[in-house]
Image: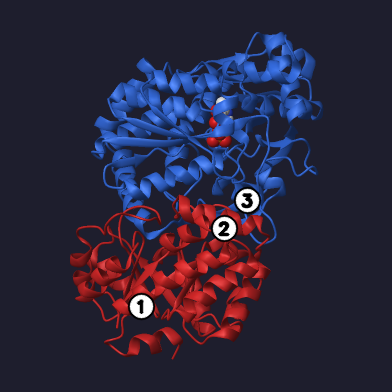
């Protein structure tokens, strides 16, 4: 059983999952920030590989990827960081990346499994294109995360969820990743509708910004909530002051984790 | 006319939110192919609004220099100033039929942005255009044209601030506004069904050119030349001759400051397979798969990707793709102006330069066909900046 399946095997478990771009603002500081989130009780991690053209991301995560690349965080650095994170903690680790990085990497799946990654989400790969990817994940014991969008029809969502062996990533709203003032009005209904289709754990991301949002997602029946841009914004604001960034991240993660208890 | 894959290339590699709107475009595209009302309306616009058919010109002075017959397919004379109008009239009509109330587009040279803004003005649909800030500066006249047509132009600063970044931001707009918005893609690339859809709209170039050269020269051309950015004017021209084995086909890629300089946009010659902008195709990229910043004097060719059908045509050796440097393109800009009194777009001048270079290999009664994809007014300012006052 992979770590995500273990995490969600307790049907009452609510998971808070912070997102970090690997290498932002630098490879070493990135580890420190992720460590702070783990120490604050994060239930799992969603980690991004910086990509030159993150077309599913809003301005905050675009800038984050750009900082990471500028700081010299290449694919090898991401792998080294993953090893270090895995050596430090045993929590589930999911990756969120753009397909070209995997496509170009020799023996990518084998390598990710070896460094202790549990599941992979490819931002730009719908189910029509994912057969080979899913087979490679399965072959290497990696979990599959698939996206379910606000405009995914029911039958399609059911098929996607049946193929998501780790969890389904429910896109919280139309648009790119980003901070927003409030969750989409129809999110709770969507979660309920999806729950009726499948037992696949639902984890909500995109536009989730605060512990109140996380609470609302858990209340609506989401098994997990991902905050990305709000955390990344903390990093952006405190680039020169890593201690301050750690403090703010600790506070945010602690408040979100408490929500799920 | 609807292919998801060209050999191994193509596909629909997009975030889940874009699957539904792309399928909607696919269904609409299938429907219009046998819809007489749509076809008549499009035909009417192409003829009575845009001025089709465009002429074929026997370029006598260039022919003398080349040592064989040079024929120019004059897409520069199409309303809007480039072949892009063929595509935008078709797609804007499609958008209207789909009930979309807003159109977005990316643009490099500004020609696709202008052509989309024009179609939007004509059909009464608001248009938002994304354009890299570097292109906004080097194609300033086209920005003013788009604004006059009532479009909103968004200057994109991220990444290399050119065409690929404009596409990124247009895609981001689309995932945010999928319900009411149509994405009018500008070239025969991107996710399925755009490579097929755009090729379908541009095939008129090849259909006309074939008839015209048969009429004028009494024979099929020995070779046909087009520049390749994303590949739409090229696929449009080539589609008229793909089945004619005697017609050699040539694509001119932007070699910028030279193919070994790393300052080029020669995707087919120097790129590697990858998955980006919705398609499995070739891209200029680094070893990790980070997309590279390309360079070309011509904004319309300054793109690190290429339509998937061209990768297949290259693999099958049906089309020969060769590089043309900035320098050669500028020389061709001067040559065709001085010899024929035609101001051709920097993009198109890549095709002119390649044809003049390859002409040596043909006998004196050979017929070479060049697609002049657009007019060069937009490039005059850049020309003066690069080469000094005329
Ligand atoms: C005049 C002209 N020719 C060619 C191109 C390149 O595009 P494509 O390869 O799709 O024809 C452009 C693009 O902006 C253009 O404006």
Taking depth in this image into account, of A54 and A139 the one nearest to the observer is A54
Residue B183: give x, y in percent of width and height. Answer: 38, 41
Q: Tell me if I can see residue B10 in this picture.
A: no
Q: Quadrant of the C terminus of chain A?
A: bottom left
Tell me which image quadrant ligand 1 sits in.
Answer: top right
Q: Kindly report the distance in space between the C-alpha atoms of the residues bearing marks 2 and 1.
A: 25 Å
What label sits on residue B101 in the rendered view?
none
Q: Which percent across, then down, holds residue A206?
A: 36, 61
Chain of the residue displaying label 1: A
Q: Nearer the viewer, mark 2 or mark 1?
A: 2
Asked if the residues shown at circle 3 and circle 1 are in contact, with their CB atoms under 8 angstroms apart, the answer is no
User: Label 1's element?
Assistant: helix
The residue identified by callout 2 is: A239
Examine the rendering and report whether any part of residue B297 can be seen.
Answer: yes
Graded by Cα atoms within 10 Å as few (under 14), some (14 to 19) or many (20 or more), the crowding at tag 1 reads many
- CA gap between label 2 and label 3 equals 33 Å
Q: Give the chain coloured blue.
A: B
Query: Where is residue A167 shown, x and y percent of the image?
Result: 37, 77
Do marks 2 and 3 share a chain? no
Q: Residues within 10 Å of mark 2 (few under 14, many from 20)?
A: some
From the viewer's perspective, is B193 left or right of A156?
A: right
Mark 1 highlights which residue?
Answer: A257
Q: Dividing the picture into quarters, in which one does residue B318 lie?
A: top right
The chain drawn red is chain what? A
Q: Return the chain for callout 2.
A: A
Quadrant in the rendering for residue B296:
top right
List the residue tagged with mark 3.
B283
């Amino acid at each position: 059983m992979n770590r995500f399946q273990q995490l969600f095997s307790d049907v009452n478990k609510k998971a808070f999952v912070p997102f970090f771009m690997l290498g932002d603002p630098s490879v070493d500081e990135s580890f420190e920030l992720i460590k702070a989130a783990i120490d604050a009780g994060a239930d799992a991690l969603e980690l991004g590989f910086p990509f030159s053209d993150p077309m599913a991301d809003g301005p905050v995560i675009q800038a984050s990827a750009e900082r990471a690349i500028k700081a010299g965080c290449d694919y090898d650095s991401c792998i080294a960081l993953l090893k270090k994170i895995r050596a430090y903690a045993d929590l589930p680790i999911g990756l969120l990346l753009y397909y070209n990085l995997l496509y170009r990497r020799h023996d990518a799946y084998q390598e990710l499994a070896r460094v202790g990654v549990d599941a992979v989400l490819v931002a730009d790969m719908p189910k029509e294109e994912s057969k080979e990817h899913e087979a490679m994940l399965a072959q290497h014991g990696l979990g599959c995360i698939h996206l379910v969008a606000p405009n995914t029809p029911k039958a399609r969502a059911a098929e996607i969820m049946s193929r998501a062996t780790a969890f389904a990533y429910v896109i919280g709203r139309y648009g790119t990743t980003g901070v927003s003032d409030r969750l989409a009005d129809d999110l709770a209904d969507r979660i309920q509708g999806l729950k009726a289709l499948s037992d696949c754990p639902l984890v909500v991301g995109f536009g989730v910004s605060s512990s109140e949002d996380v609470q609302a997602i858990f209340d609506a029946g989401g098994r997990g909530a991902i905050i990305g841009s709000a955390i990344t914004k903390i990093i952006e604001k405190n680039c020169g002051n890593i201690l301050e960034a750690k403090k703010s991240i600790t506070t945010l993660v602690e408040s979100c984790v408490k929500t799920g208890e | 006319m609807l292919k998801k894959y060209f050999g191994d290339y193509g596909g629909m590699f997009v975030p889940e939110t874009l699957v539904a709107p792309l399928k909607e475009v696919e269904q609409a595209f299938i429907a219009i192919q046998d819809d007489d009302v749509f076809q008549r309306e499009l035909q009417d616009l192409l003829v009575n609004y845009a001025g089709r058919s465009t002429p074929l010109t026997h370029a006598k002075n260039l022919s003398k220099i080349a040592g064989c017959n040079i024929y120019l397919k004059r897409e520069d004379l199409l309303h809007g100033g480039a072949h892009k109008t063929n595509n935008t009239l078709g797609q804007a009509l499609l958008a209207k039929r789909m009930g979309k109330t807003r159109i977005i587009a990316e643009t490099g040279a500004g020609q696709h942005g202008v052509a989309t803004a024009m179609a939007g003005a004509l059909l009464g649909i608001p248009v938002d255009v994304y354009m890299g800030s570097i292109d906004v500066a080097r194609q300033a006249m086209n920005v003013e044209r788009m604004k006059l047509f009532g479009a909103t132009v968004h200057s994109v600063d991220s990444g290399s601030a050119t065409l690929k970044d404009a596409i990124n931001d247009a895609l981001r707009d689309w995932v945010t506004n999928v319900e009411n918005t149509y994405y009018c893609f500008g070239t025969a690339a991107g996710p399925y069904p755009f490579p097929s859809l755009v090729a379908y709209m541009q095939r008129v170039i090849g259909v006309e050119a074939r008839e015209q050269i048969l009429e004028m020269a009494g024979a099929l051309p020995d070779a046909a030349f087009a520049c390749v950015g994303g590949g739409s004017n090229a696929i449009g021209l080539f589609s008229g001759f793909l089945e004619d084995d005697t017609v050699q086909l040539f694509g001119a890629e932007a070699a910028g400051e030279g193919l070994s300089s790393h300052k080029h946009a020669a995707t087919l010659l120097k790129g590697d397979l990858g998955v980006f902008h919705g398609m499995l195709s070739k891209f200029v990229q680094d070893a990790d798969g980070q997309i590279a910043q390309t360079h070309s004097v011509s904004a319309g060719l300054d793109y690190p990707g290429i339509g998937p059908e061209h990768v297949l045509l290259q693999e099958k050796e049906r089309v020969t793709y060769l590089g043309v440097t900035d320098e050669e393109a500028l020389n061709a800009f001067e040559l065709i102006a001085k010899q024929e009194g035609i101001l051709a777009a920097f993009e198109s001048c890549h095709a002119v330069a390649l044809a003049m270079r390859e002409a040596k290999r043909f006998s004196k009664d050979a017929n070479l066909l060049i697609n002049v994809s657009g007019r060069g007014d937009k490039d005059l300012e850049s020309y003066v900046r690069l080469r000094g006052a005329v």
